[in-house]
Image (tube, helix red, strand yellow):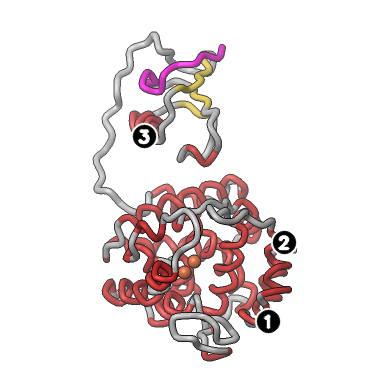
Amino acid sequence: MLKTIKAHDLGIGMYVILTQGWFKHPFLKNKFKINSEKQIKEIIDCGIVNVVIDTDKSSQTDNDINLPIPEKWEPKKLIPKEFRDVINDKNFPPKEKAKFVYKSSIDIMNKLLKSPTVQNIKEFKEGVSDMVDLILTDNITSQYLLNITYHDHYTYTHSVNVGVYSILLSKALFKNSAIHDMHELGAGFFLHDIGKVRVNSAIINKQGKLTDDEMSEMRTHPSLGYDILSEANQLSEECKVIVMEHHERYDGTGYPLGLKGDDIHLYARVCSIADVYDALTSKRSYKKKLKPFDALALMKEEMMNHFHKEIFDEFVLLFK
Ligand SMILES: [Fe+2]
Ligand SMILES: [Fe+2]
């Protein structure tokens, strides 16, 4: 029997059905049996007030007494243990694995951007390594990852999307060549906008177009990001150059340095294509989001001077 109860009245053993959208909660599935107080807290923390329970599948109902099971205390870590466990679980279904990894990455990125400490950047790099290995070795899960990307206006979602697209594009371009350190590259792609944490948040969150002054401040984020990663001293120069040059344009019209052609680092040229594509396919307060095909068509027809043609052509092939 299905029954609606308050989230606060949930107990361990209850079989819960979350009717909210997949992105409204941090769980892999919408239906599952509650097995810890932590899960109840997570449901309440994401703003869910009422939940549906299936009393037939519950090993207790709200009439039973809830005895909390004490959880082992662990220091807060940026990358949860399950992240690596799921990635390395060969029996995990690819579609579910892609969903879990994507949602976890967004959560991790959100936490990192709120607290970009040296320790967190170090941990983040380790987490990215697992993600890169997954994309390099598991084509089926990678394809699901490409297809489930979600588009909103948050920097953390955008950062994960650009990371996923850029790693896939690098995989296609470099074919696992040993010359390119994909782990370093991956970190650079995911962190390309980290400099935005030092830009005035009123500018980052502004609804509508930026004024010239605001745009000037926004345009400092590549060099601010470079500074953050230099201070943290956890990543290579090649990774930092992605952060510094991802807004440079092939025809020299980009910023901050106005570099042109192959003077822009190869990895930054890769990142810039993924970056523009994700911006076009994401909703902004002042513009509608474009469908993938329309975004690629616009880039080809109106922005082609901004990109390295061969790299762009390879990017289009990812979506075929
Ligand atoms: Fe950027
Ligand atoms: Fe970006």
Q: Earlier in the sequence, mark 1 or mark 3?
A: 3
To which residue does mark 3 refer? 45
Residue 23: x and y in percent read 52, 41
- What distance separates the C-alpha of mark 1 from that of mark 3? 46 Å
- Answer whether residue 184 is magenta in the image: no
Q: Which mark is residue 243?
A: none
Instruction: Identify which residue is drawn at 43% across, 67% down.
Output: 193
Q: Is residue 204 above or below residue 304?
A: above
Question: Where is residue 68, by image quadrant?
Answer: top left
Q: Earlier in the sequence, mark 2 or mark 3?
A: 3
Q: Is residue 92 above or below residue 181?
A: above
Mark 2 element type:
helix
Residue 124: x and y in percent read 37, 62
Instruction: Identify which residue is drawn at 42% across, 47% down.
Output: 82
At label 3, counting other C-alpha atoms closer than 10 Å, the crowd grade (few under 14, some 14-19, many 20 or more) is few
Is 66 displayed left or right of 271 in the figure?
left
Is 258 displayed left or right of 281 in the figure?
left
To which residue does mark 2 refer? 294
At label 1, counting other C-alpha atoms closer than 10 Å, the crowd grade (few under 14, some 14-19, many 20 or more) is few
At label 2, counting other C-alpha atoms closer than 10 Å, the crowd grade (few under 14, some 14-19, many 20 or more) is few
- At label 3, the amino acid type is Asp
Residue 242: x and y in percent read 46, 77
Q: Quadrant of the C terminus?
A: bottom right
Where does the magenta region start and end? 1-11
- At label 2, the amino acid type is Asp
Toward the viewer: 192 or 74?
A: 192
Mark 3 element type:
helix
To which residue does mark 1 refer? 309
Instruction: Identify which residue is drawn at 51% across, 65% down.
Output: 132
